[in-house]
Amino acid sequence: MSKIKKQTYIALLVAIAVIGSSFLWFPAGVAKAFPVQHAVNVIAGVLLGPVPAVIIAFLTGLIRNFMGTGSLLAFPGGMIGAFLAGYLYRKMKRTWAASAGEIIGSGLIAPLFAVPYAALLLGTSAGAFFYIPAFLVSSLSGALLGYLIVTRIKKSRAWKYDTDS
């Protein structure tokens, strides 16, 4: 895949994540669930690989924070899940592995990073168990959505992807 083509896909997926998060969200405990971001993480992890997926998650979080529609907690949550989605897909070559990576990364590992991060940047002293339910619900719903989309893309052969370039 050419560098320009990959950058175009990155920009497109960032735009989908930013706009999609404005329209599709639901309350999940102490936070809001944004399943589109998690779905994009799975799609990017499968179709582009772990590094572009992390870049997409970072840029999405950055733009949403500048717009006032995001939280600083989107950075550890989105980036860890995106990396694991791409990494596990690359290792196992199974779409379900990307979804599992997103759930494990964003739903279980990211809340552990969120505790010191939130204490330092947001001034909250909540423990990991405070964040796990909301992060898990959000990542589970988005990973399922991403799995369904990637399965359809692969079945239709609509995207000629190459994760090794």
Image (spheres, helix red, strand yellow):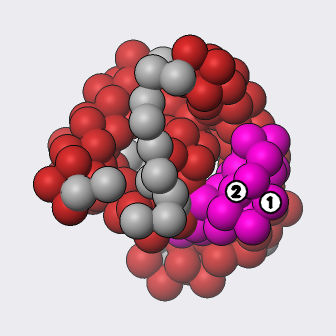
Placement of 25 over or under 57, stated as above or below? above
Q: Main secondary structure of the magenta part?
A: helix
In the picture, residue 20 is in which quadrant? top left
Q: Amino acid at mark 1?
A: Met
Placement of 55 over or under 12, stated as above or below? below
Inspect the magenta stretch and tell me whether residue 111 lies in it.
no
For residue 100, the mark is: none
Residue position for label 1: 92
Inspect the magenta stretch and tell me whether residue 95 lies in it.
yes
Label 1 packing within 10 angstroms: few (<14), some (14-19), many (20+): few
Is 153 left or right of 91, judged from the image as shown?
Answer: left
Q: At x 69% / y 37%, what residue is drawn?
A: 143
Is 12 left or right of 21, judged from the image as shown?
Answer: left
Which segment did they paint magenta? 76-104
**Between residues 126 and 105, which one lies in front from this camera angle?**
105
Q: Residue furthest left?
A: 4
Q: Amino acid at mark 2?
A: Tyr
Q: In the rendered image, is residue 100 in sight?
A: yes
Percent coordinates x, y for residue 136 in the rendering: 77, 46
Residue position for label 2: 89
Q: Are marks 1 and 2 in contact (CB under 8 Å)?
A: yes
Q: Secondary structure at mark 1?
A: helix
If the image is split into quadrants, where does the N terminus sit? bottom left
If the image is split into quadrants, where does the C terminus sit? bottom left
**Between residues 67 and 145, which one lies in front from this camera angle?**
145
